[in-house]
Amino acid sequence: MLINPAAGQPSAAGRGIEVARHLREAGAAVTVTHTRSAEHGCQVATAAATRGSVVVAVGGDGTVGSVAGSILAARGILGLVPVGRGNDFARQLGIPNDAASVAALLLTGPVRSIDVIDVDGQIVVGSLYAGIDSLTSKLVNRFHQLPVGLQYPVAAVWAIATHRSTDYRIVVDGVSRSISAHTVIVANSGYYGSGMHVAPSARLDDGLLDIVVFAAAGRSRLLKALRMIYSGTHLLLPEVTVQTGRVVTIDSTGPVDAYADGDRVGPLPVGARVRPGALSVIAPPALTD
């Protein structure tokens, strides 16, 4: 069990210890490690997965994303205890929140094979994005003083107030298009931004990526999209388009940073491809919509 002390919820360590107690009471052998850094977490995850242990990530999307590549490479199994700011990957999987239910799932739940995104060699479990969403992620990482439930909404409104559209070139499965847009999202999971249902049709086991584009629009339209995105109804707006594909490249005419699962990837251009069924994870039998 890898506990990230820097996860968004102050109770992260306590929740992890509580789950560990339930697991031990049921007879499981549990080793708890408080990670010192992302690199330390990857080292521990690799060693544990190699010797056949389930690696349980206690944290949010960033914590999961930081160790997923190591677990995948070692052909290990991932478990989740969601205690981060967003927990969007856990939300898509249908992972429960209370400690007893999480422990029961880890003990008896099925192991599912799910897709991941390979972003120029980096493994991403949720989504890759560039534009207003990457600015939002950058701001969220500065807003730790706000209550967890307010960090993403406040950062999103701030980003909308300051962001300008950018000219992008998007290549999906070899077909290129150019568009002036506020953001481009390459989604493996349907949720991001602490419950925003950005890609309602995305599935973790369909071998496809959902590419969601918000074309250039006024701030009032962006605010309307923000209100609608939690329910997924933003797809009704004419500025929003969705397509699916397996290999995606994003480039821009000006400098734009790409983020994935809440963390910075680097400047555009970036390339992404789906790796179908590459990661084994303990999750409820039915993936959620």
Image (cartoon, rainbow, N blue to C red):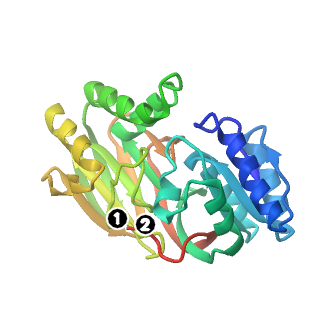
| Rendered residue at 75%/50% (across/down) | 2
- Element carrying mark 1: strand
Residue 107 x %, y %: 71, 70
Residue 35 visible, this angle: yes
Residue 224, compared with residue 186, is above or below; it is above
Residue 82, compared with residue 28, is above or below; it is above
Among numbered discs 2 and 1, the one appearing first in the sequence: 1
The residue tagged 1 is 172
Q: Which amino acid does label 2 sit on?
A: Val
| Rendered residue at 44%/35% (across/down) | 149
Residue 123 x %, y %: 59, 58
CA distance separating discs 2 and 1: 6 Å
Q: Residue 22 carries which label?
A: none
Say which quadrant the N terminus sits in: bottom right
**Local crowd size for mark 2, using a 10 Å CA cut-off: few (<14), some (14–19), many (≥20):** many
Q: Is mark 2 in CB contact (under 8 Å) with mark 1? A: yes
Residue 109, compared with residue 87, is above or below; it is below
Residue 166 x %, y %: 27, 38
Residue 181 visible, this angle: no
**Local crowd size for mark 1, using a 10 Å CA cut-off: few (<14), some (14–19), many (≥20):** many
Q: In this view, does 172 lie to the left or right of 268?
A: left
Say which quadrant the C terminus sits in: bottom left
Q: Which amino acid does label 1 sit on?
A: Val
Q: In this view, does 34 lie to the left or right of 283?
A: right
Which is nearer the eye, 164 or 190?
190
Q: Is residue 179 left or right of residue 40?
A: left
Figure quadrant of residue 221: top left
| Rendered residue at 52%/50% (across/down) | 87
Q: Is residue 238 left or right of residue 106?
A: left
Residue 258 x %, y %: 45, 43
| Rendered residue at 81%/52% (across/down) | 43
Q: Residue 247 carries which label?
A: 2
